[in-house]
Image (spheres, rainbow, N blue to C red):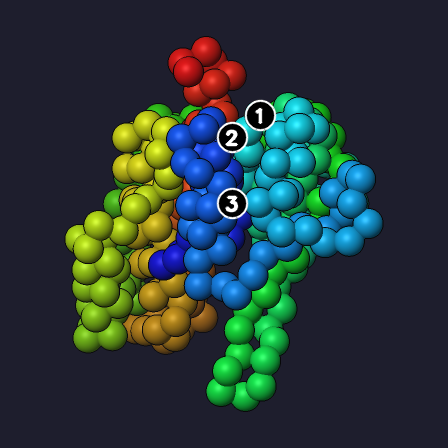
């Protein structure tokens, strides 16, 4: 979770664009990031993939007033509302964007193109029909913040006891790099989001980083099968909580609009 999911960038900056807080060019630049190009396939009225600027304009014309993110995992359809066809595709990609105001969803498909030494990434977002229903298992920002704090305390205690918490030179270097990026003024989310959403997303990304480091560091000091099982049990709910918190943060803009805050 060191970097934002593509669906998160599309949700955050798409919401800022739909609200008139950023220009189309600035929004697309932020959404594409380090990728070469993003296109949208399957838009109503379009027979071929189109660029993001045209796609976002078309979605607005079709009634889309906001975007939500989904970050599903096996057994956990986080942020999804159906139908099964869309859910299956989103589950395979492990992310999706669900439109608010019109029954559409977008699932990314990532390609690598170019010769050796000059490979670039292209993304095609597949526009599909979705069911208009509440997204699955998405907490409020307050719930997400409390869950993160509790899960982090519990996991740190267990992982430290098993000697598999993010520790050592490699882990410290990764955490330092994360902090350096934040200190350089990396913009989290996009204009229009409440400060609490920014805070929750930053904490979720840090928790996700610790989980990733724990997985990447092998079994650490967990040498017995029982210890390895305890380690996995400690990581699984923390990773789930971090994903739930990310979704809550990205979806905060639409949730506030639904509550009449905006």
Query: Is 207 situated above or below 146?
Result: below
Cα separation, mark 3 vs mark 2, equals 11 Å
- Provide the residue designation for mark 1: 65
Where's residue 236, x and y in %?
46, 53
- Quadrant position of residue 53: top right
Q: Is residue 259 visible?
A: yes
Residue found 40% across the figure and 67% down from its top: 215
Label 3: few (<14), some (14–19) or many (≥20) C-alpha neighbours in 10 Å? many
Crowding at mark 1 (Cα within 10 Å: few <14, some 14-19, many 20+):
some
Q: Are marks 3 and 1 in contact (CB under 8 Å)?
A: no
Question: Could you tell which of marks 3 and 2 lies nearer the N-terminus?
Answer: 3
Label 3–label 2 contact, CB within 8 A: no
For image coordinates 72% across by 54% down, the residue present is 49
Instruction: Report the residue at 44% width, 34% height from top.
Output: 16
Q: Nearer the viewer, residue 5 or 38?
A: 38
Can you tell which quarter of the image residue 253 is in? top left
Q: Which residue is mark 3?
A: 10
Nearer-N-terminus badge (3/1): 3
Is residue 8 something that shows in the picture? Answer: no
Badge 2 vs badge 1, beta-carbon distance below 8 Å: yes
Outermost residue to the bottom: 116
Determine whether the residue tagged by mark 2 lies in a helix, strand or loop: helix
> Which mark is on residue 14?
none
Q: As displayed, is residue 184 above or below residue 221?
A: above
56, 100: nearer the viewer: 56
> Residue 40: x, y in percent?
67, 50
**Residue 141 in the image, given as x and y percentages of width and height:** 38, 28
Q: Nearer the viewer, mark 3 or mark 2?
A: 2
Q: CA distance from mark 2 to mark 1?
A: 7 Å
Relative side of 120 to 169, left or right: right
Q: Residue at label 2?
A: 18
Task: Tell me where residue 66 appears, x and y as whole percent.
Answer: 55, 29
């Amino acid at each position: 979770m060191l970097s934002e999911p593509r669906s998160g960038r599309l949700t955050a900056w798409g919401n800022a664009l739909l609200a008139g807080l950023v220009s189309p060019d600035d929004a697309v630049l932020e959404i594409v990031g380090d990728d070469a190009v993003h296109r949208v396939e399957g838009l109503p009225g379009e027979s071929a993939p189109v660029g993001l600027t045209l796609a976002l304009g078309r979605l607005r014309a079709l009634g889309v007033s906001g975007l939500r993110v989904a970050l599903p995992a096996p057994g956990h359809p986080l942020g999804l509302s159906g139908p099964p066809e869309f859910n299956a595709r989103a589950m395979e990609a492990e992310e999706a964007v669900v439109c608010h105001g019109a029954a559409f969803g977008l699932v990314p498909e990532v390609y690598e193109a170019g010769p050796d030494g000059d490979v670039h990434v292209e993304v095609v977002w597949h526009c599909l029909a979705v069911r208009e229903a509440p997204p699955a298992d998405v907490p409020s920002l307050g719930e997400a913040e409390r869950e993160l704090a509790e899960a982090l305390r519990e996991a740190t205690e267990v992982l430290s006891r098993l000697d598999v918490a993010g520790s050592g030179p490699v882990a410290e270097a990764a955490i330092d790099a994360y902090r350096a990026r934040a200190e350089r003024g990396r913009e989290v989310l996009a204009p229009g989001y409440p400060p609490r959403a920014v805070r929750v997303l930053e904490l979720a990304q840090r928790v996700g980083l610790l989980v990733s480091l724990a997985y990447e560091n092998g079994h650490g000091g967990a040498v017995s099968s029982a210890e390895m099982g305890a380690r996995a049990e400690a990581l699984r709910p923390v990773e789930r909580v971090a994903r739930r918190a990310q979704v809550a943060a990205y979806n905060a803009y639409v949730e506030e609009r639904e509550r009449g805050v905006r």
